[in-house]
Image (spheres, rainbow, N blue to C red):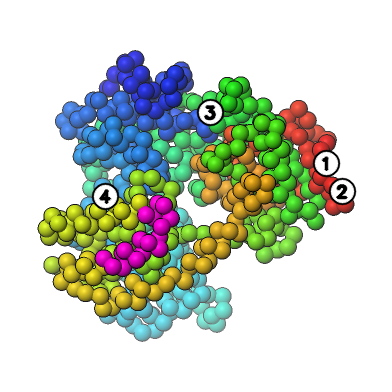
Amino acid sequence: MIKVCPADIAYAESILLKPGHTFDEERLAFIYNFKTLDLQAVPGSGKTTVLLAKLLILEKHLPLKKNKGVLVLSHTNAAVDEIKERIGQYCPKLFSHPNFVGTIQSFVDNFLAIPAYLNEYKKKPIRIDDEIYEETIKRIFHFNRKDFGSQEKTDAIYYEKNFNVLFSFRLKFQNGEFVMIDSIGGELITIKTPKHKKEKYTDHQLKRISEWFIKTKLKVLEAGILCYDDAYLLAEVLLKKIPTYSSLLQSRFKYVFVDEMQDMGKHQFELLEKIFAGWQSNSFYQRLGDINQSIYSKTISSNEVWNQRSEKLFISGSHRLSKPNAKIVERLSITGSAVEGRMKDDNDDYLNIKPKLICYDVEKITEVIPLFSDIVKQLIDDKAITHTSKNKYEAVGWRKHHDHVDKICISDYWPSYKSTAKTKKIDYETLEDYLLFVETKSTIFNSHRKALLNALNKILYIEKVRDEYLRVFTVSKLIRHFKNLNEKEYSTLKLNLYNWSVGLNKNESEKVLLELREYIPKFLKCFNSKVRLSQKFINEASSNKAEIEVNSSLRYLDKNGIRVGIKSIHSVKGQTHTATLYLETFYDRGAGNYESQRLSNQIIGTPIKEYLDNYKGGSIEKIIQSARMAYVGFSRPTHLLCFAINNVRAKNLIDKIDKTEWDVIEIKKNDKVEDS
């Protein structure tokens, strides 16, 4: 077991904290402890920072005895990039074999799915990607099969036309055979006769339809094309066929850290538990996160996905939240966790800006976001907010659009709002698309480099360039080809990738595109090929460029020298804002339709856990879901929190609200904006 001394703590503090700042007792308790446990941490607690402190200290003890490794997992590439960016230069051993720092998906791909595929098919999969998978399964679905008659094929196609499950269904390995399920970790699909069919299918016909889908899926797998979910299927098969495989992974990784545990899907959680949990496990397994922020999971119960251990530590102090904001956020904590606001102003005094309740008549709904901008401007003028270029002011909501005019959503507050945004894929229609859709948040260029390599790999695919085994190139094969070619060509490629990544990070995509087009003939020459079939892909302009530019401009308000972004709650999770406006929106029926109805008691002052412990009504899952959304949205701002509610619902709250906690601002149909 790793032993931590005060000198280790001082070393981590010198790298991660501002001069003169130190870790408090809550954080030290976690940094010192390397046993199996859970860390429940509030928003803005610096949870990732204390994990980094632990990793910095762990680096000093590497390599571990018997060549054991350290496994660090998070949910997104951006989170992994942050870890590498902040401590990469101090931890060369941590980021090399036998250790692994990556996403849950990359871990499953590398340590379970690919070994399982090799074991089953004696070769590596060609591609793990949803886009390519859908292309492939659509094509293979219509192939004839020797063991199926023409009518059976017709039945399967008719079923697909009616139920549209081809892209969404997954396989589960159950009792030694594959069965169809509706989603990864989901329910079994019962094949049934479509409603409009006059004659019902016989049991034999239904069985054959199911077999057609299953065999189609297995054919795609055999071809080496996997969707991301298939990695978990293969992992499941591997663990069932080789029960000792978990022990092998435990022997490889002595210390396992999983950040943002609340964002894991049920299938991901269960897989990690199978491998690393249990009293006989040889690994020390630590899970970090905040159950209250679990808004991605399909399951609702706070214990259903992440059932926290009895051995649990807490970080309740938030360096993001002010005391007034923390008080309201704490009431929305499903776990009943304390939330202590520690945010201070430039004078080192605790911030005390009172949250605002903006109550509007529906006819004035489009004035809500401009009013929020006015409030921010007033606070800047009053020196309560120091305005800098780094400040973020955001209006956020749960539901983006709704067809029903009476069901309020984000686009009612901001009619020009468009939800169409950059969709990150690895396969696009034109070369320019690869540059336009690149993720630009990372400053270490991982995502830029990946996008560029995927674009070059797509050109090889279009030109039908294959490896020595007549198989399509992957990015890793492409790089290996250049390494084996000669040092000059490989150095040129690396330098180009770096320079283009810098250019993309500076939003110089047009310049990068010109240089890339100029380089491609030289690139193809390294494969004894030239530009023929890929000419259209390389030179055709993106059809998405104008849409990206227009949609970007429609998702913010510029007023008072302040830009207010307009976004969904999901898109701002993990962000820190200077000011946040939470827009209540319609979401389903049950215990009310809006957050202000389901969470009325919390707005007034009753903690949600206390309320739910005594709740006798129905639709409890809707209340929990709304509480989690509000918890995430309300916990974004450092300074100002505003909550917009329609007056129809606000009238039941205004008289009961504690006016020492909320300022109420009303926007009435025939009145000017007024404070009350």
Compare marks 1 and 4 and give the one earlier in the sequence: 4
Q: Quadrant of residue 84?
A: top left
Check the image and name the residue furthest to the bottom. 150
User: In the rendered image, which residue does mark 1 sit on?
Assistant: 674
Residue 304 position within the rendered picture, expressed as x and y whole percent measured from the top left: 49, 41
Taking 307 as reference, is 609 left or right?
A: right
User: In the rendered image, which residue does mark 3 sit on?
Assistant: 319
Neighbor class of circle 3 (other Cα within 10 Å; few <14, some 14-19, many 20+) is some
Magenta segment range? Answer: 503-519
Question: Rounded to the nearest whole Å, what is the CA distance between mark 1 and mark 2?
Answer: 8 Å
Neighbor class of circle 4 (other Cα within 10 Å; few <14, some 14-19, many 20+) is few
**Residue type marked 3:** His
**Which circle marks residue 671 in the picture?**
2
Neighbor class of circle 2 (other Cα within 10 Å; few <14, some 14-19, many 20+) is few
User: In the rendered image, which residue does mark 4 sit on?
Assistant: 110
**Residue type marked 2:** Asp
Compare marks 2 and 3 and give the one earlier in the sequence: 3
Taking 562 as reference, is 75 left or right?
A: left
Task: Give above or below for 388 relative to 190.
Answer: above
Question: Rounded to the nearest whole Å, what is the CA distance between mark 1 and mark 3?
Answer: 32 Å
